[in-house]
Amino acid sequence: MEGCIQQPLLPEMSAPYIFRTGPFAVVPQEPVVEEQPYTLCTSRSQPRLKTGEVAFECKYGTDSPVKVPLTAFFDAEGWCTDFEVCEAINNWCDKAYRYPETKRKCINCKCKATKGFVLCGKCDNVMGQMIYAQ
């Protein structure tokens, strides 16, 4: 399946990746221990939950895809734990920076995102440190 990468699912999400501003590069921090493999499917238009939060489709073995919310890929300290999710968020941040006049929704709720960003003002107070970490 095109656009799908085999990734491990960790019961306790550790902090293997970090977001950087500027060129929006993802820097690996430590190796990931494989436990429960799953396939993460990313697409140009990601599905959303009823709350408006972006969801990623994860396929475990031969089961049908399950929508996993964006916040499930962050640990308690606010670090992203999946490389493909980090790349997707960095890509969205980069596009928002390059095209600030494009109308877009917040990646965490149904509100309109601030120009040049991927979060609205309300979610920026809650998730801003996780998404725009320096």
Image: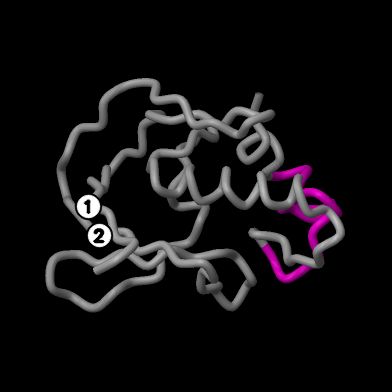
Task: Indicate the quadrant where residue 33 lies.
Answer: top left
> Within the magenta stretch, is there residue 11?
no
User: What is the distance, in whole Å, between disc 2 and disc 1 at their CAs?
Assistant: 5 Å
Kindly identify which numbered label has been placed on residue 97.
none
90 to the left or right of 121: left
- Residue 101, image x, y percentages: 86, 59
Residue that mark 1 sits on: 6
Query: In percent of the image, x 55 and y 72: which residue is there?
Result: 48
Which amino acid type is marked by label 1?
Answer: Gln
Task: Indicate the quadrant where residue 16 lies.
Answer: top left
Q: What stretch is highlighted in magenta?
A: 109-126
Q: In which quarter of the image is the N terminus?
A: bottom left
- Residue 134, image x, y percentages: 66, 24
- Badge 1, how many Cα within 10 Å: few under 14, some, many 20+? some
Magenta region, main secondary structure: loop
Q: Check the image and tell me how it is coloured.
A: one colour
Q: Which of 88 and 99 is in front in this view?
A: 99
Kindly identify which numbered label has been placed on residue 39.
2
- Residue 15, image x, y percentages: 41, 29
Which amino acid type is marked by label 2?
Answer: Thr
Earlier along the polypeptide chain: callout 2 or callout 1? 1
